[in-house]
Amino acid sequence: MVDKKVLTIQEQISSGISVLKQGGLVAFPTDTVYGLGASCAIPRAVERIYEAKERSENLALPLLLAEPSRINEVASYVSPLAWLLVRKFLPGALTLVLPASKSVSRVITGGGKTVAVRIPAHPLVIALIQGVGSPIIGTSANLSDQPSALTADEVYSQLGDKIDLVIDGGRCLGRESTIIDVTGEVPRVLREGAISREELKRCVELFDGE
């Protein structure tokens, strides 16, 4: 049963940390859209994300980190180009696809060899990550192939009792993060979102435009 009691934001954050540590699923506002989180250290919690979203387990799940220094813990290699993008756009609405470290579960990578990471520019999410003490899953809080949720009510309408807690932080901005693959020599935009191709091109000279 999803907890819909009226609590302060700080109380909701504390509840969210507790739920995540116990293997539960928590939806929360971010600087893009509402996210759905689970502890990356609890495999069953990660599996529940796939089930709640009705998402194929072959599709990798992104990780949210609290600070750039944690990227090396989940990526086996971070190129100079990737660090340039980190310095320019993170915290913010950019998701980087990197070679996955062996420490990252194959449940998270969808059986692949890469991991998607983002550092959100939202203090509530950072507080959750720091409270849990490790990166958390940070996928959109919606059913697969359905519109992203911009409010807590939209999360409830799509996911309902499939998750354990929804932190109501008001309406989100509504632009999903831009996803860029930096595993090769030339970066590739996999999804254009809040950060435009033009902004990326001004920062990165080598760019294939795909």
Image: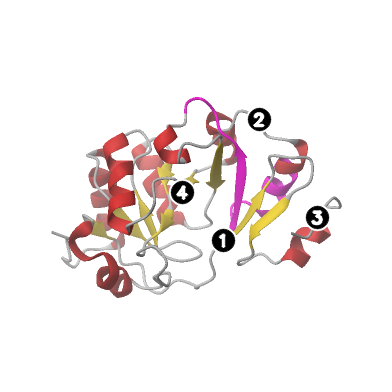
Q: Which residue is mark 2?
A: 77
Q: Earlier in the sequence, mark 1 or mark 4?
A: 4
Q: Earlier in the sequence, mark 2 or mark 1?
A: 2
Span of residues in magenta: 83-103
Q: Earlier in the sequence, mark 3 or mark 2?
A: 2
Q: CA distance from mark 4 to mark 3?
A: 24 Å
At which x and y percent is residue 106? 44, 33
For the C terminus, give its image quadrant: bottom right
Q: CA distance from mark 4 to mark 2?
A: 21 Å
Label for residue 59? 4
Which residue in the rendered view is the most extreme toward the left?
1
Q: Which residue is mark 1?
A: 177
Q: CA distance from mark 2 to mark 1?
A: 22 Å
Q: Regarding mark 2 in the picture, which secondary structure is present there?
A: loop
As shown in the figure, which amino acid type bears the numbered disc 4? Leu
At which x and y percent is residue 104? 47, 31
Whether the magenta-drawn stretch holds residue 86 is answered as yes
Q: Which residue is mark 3?
A: 208
